[in-house]
Amino acid sequence: MRLLTGNDLKSGAVTWWTGSDWSIHIEDAVDVTGSEDEIARREEAARRVNVPYAIDAELHEGSPRPSHIKERVRALGPTVRPDLTLKPADPEIGNWVI
Amino acid sequence: MYAYDQYDQAMVDARVEEFRDQARRRLEGKLTEDQFKPLRLMNGLYLQLHAYMLRVAIPYGTLNSLQMRALADIAEKYDRGYGHFTTRQNIQYNWIKLEDAADILADLAKVEMHAIQTSGNCIRNISSDHFAGATADEVVDPRPYAELLRQWSSFHPEFSYLPRKFKIAVIASEKDRAAMRLHDIGINIVQNDTGELGAAFYVGGGMGRTPMIAPCINAFVPLDHFVTYAEACLRVYNRYGRRDNKYKARIKILVHELGAEEYTRQVEEEFAQLLDQGIEPPLAELERIRTFFEDPPFDGDADAEIDRSDPDFAVWVDRNTVPHKQPGYVSAVISLKPVGGIPGDATAEQMRLMADLAKDYSFDECRVMHTQNIVLPHVRKADLHALWTALEDAGLGSPNLDTVEDIIACPGLDYCSLANARSIPVAQKISERFAANGKTGTLGELKLKISGCINACGHHHAGHIGILGVDRKGVENYQLLLGGSEAEDVSLAKITGPGFDENGIVDAVETVTSVYERERQDGERFVDTYRRIGMNPFKEALYG
Ligand code: SF4
């Protein structure tokens, strides 16, 4: 599957395209295969996202998991600061990223 | 410390307002990201893995307590309560919002700081010896010269769009504590036989994908012409440096391709022409600057003895303090390398504490080291125990300067969008391993440096032991390098062989230190043993 991601223009936060909006939670991301360029153009023009681009991902236990470690780190936050990741209490986080 | 005059302040204030307008236009959609990106980069604002990242310039690493406290306030108010001190003696914040960026720059300007020229193809923050003005081994305090270069290079109209970024270090000692020969220009202020001071110019060093040690192109430029000489070096580079290929655009490639001799010839020719134009700043300006760097009012009766009855304190004194030119004083190093911690990170509370300690014990001054620690340059020996106690209580008392635990690590894949692999977890595991096996002290001086990609922000080429993170088909892999140094015995490290995974690289570091323990002769450091016995014994131990 392909996911569309970028950074929120104002905050810089990593965001994922949900089909109708942007979410900071990768679980909300939808497959954009075939329409990534068009959505990216439109959303960037609407200033809702900064430098959007599409990435490869697979479904993992029902939610998308980026194929590359860099995007997995982006999705959750620095692996060395579990207090700052999006799922601070989840012991599986490390495994999901690595 | 240097204090802004009306011109410095006016320039910085004007830049804040200019950037405020640019950021507003970007947020309103009047600028595209392509248009805005070069503008934000000129103000140190990057877009990294998780958010915008702001890099703040700390000229030659020097801060007063007011500035350190302002950095803490920014960490708390606009970021997530911490900052990261870098190998260029700067600080980076990882979680900045574009809508806050101009306010942060305004807060910085209030304490005579900024983020100008911390990115982009311009002359970056000038770095220097973190013990400048405190050590007995310098021929002169290099900071006034670094400050003069800072002023010369700030908004220099000719050098704002160089082929590539440009880094300058200034030292004034045979001991190199600033990786001087691994800079685009390294300047070492030296004294000749007649006692006259001059600047030795080393040009074309650097790390990155093509590491090079800068050759000396002129061993003695009279100090009343050293800015003109720097100008000549830059002019030749600006004219002939390659703009067609980013990977060949640094001055080291130009010097290498032309040959040091030909490059020098061109510089000398340019220098001769520039001399006629009288571009050297007036001596009065250097004298004005020098007044800011006079010795603080040292206590002439300061006690020369240290009460070492507390054994933990004595270990810290032995490892983390260095001799001072003034009897009764030392320079004390605050380690930002707690075992298992993140090298170079400090919380807002820790920054505030360091600010207080600088005020109470070091004439209101502290320095950022390129090794990502903080120096209190002038501490009375009699105050050391009180200082150490305060540091211990705040988790800042690790006695590990220049040991295997004192690891340089770049942000790596945990934060950096250019990274191939994470650096920080490797540093954490190594420091934990050596703290657990109890060898940190017995291994002596061992400089371990980790980069998360070939850009080498973690100086891996210059580590006695270096580690480079690479991407092997989407999986993190780590190459091991041995034998580098960025000190006066400068050398470039060599790769041992095939790389290792995250746990394997920790084992590999332990393996090579075991070879050192087995082979070392009296007084040899790790790097000395490596230079004497060569790579093979280490390879055999690693790969069989
Ligand atoms: S060395 Fe590479 S990974 Fe590390 S901070 Fe520099 S660019 Fe990023």
Image (tube, rainbow, N blue to C red):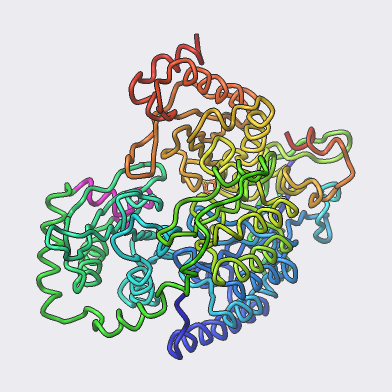
Where does residue B408 sit, x and y in percent of width and height?
54, 44
Q: Where residue A58 sits: x, y (%)?
A: 77, 35
| Magenta-highlighted residues | B242-257
**Residue B516 sits above or below residue B208 on the image:** above
Res. A32 visible in picture: no
Q: Is residue B244 magenta?
A: yes
- Main SS of the magenta part reads helix
The answer to which image quadrant residue A72 occupies is: top right
Relative height, residue B181 to residue B450 (above, below): below
In the image, residue B36 above or below residue B7:
above
Report the front residue among B282 and B476.
B282
Q: Is residue B491 above or below residue B152?
A: above
Asked whether B310 or B335 is in front, the reply is B310
The answer to whether residue B210 of the structure is visible from this angle is: yes
- Residue B440 lies, in percent from the top left, at 59, 32
Find residue B236 and report its image quarter. Answer: bottom left
Side (left or right) of A18 relative to B281: right
The residue most toward the top is B544
Q: Is residue B149 magenta?
A: no
Q: Residue at x 33, y 22 (%)?
A: B532
In screen coordinates, is B479 left or right of B140? right
- Nearer-the-camera pick, A60 or B65: B65
**Residue occupying the point 51% across, 73% down:** B39
Of residue B13 and residue B380, the one placed in the foreground of this image is: B380
x then y, percent, for residue B78: 72, 70
Q: How many marks?
A: 0
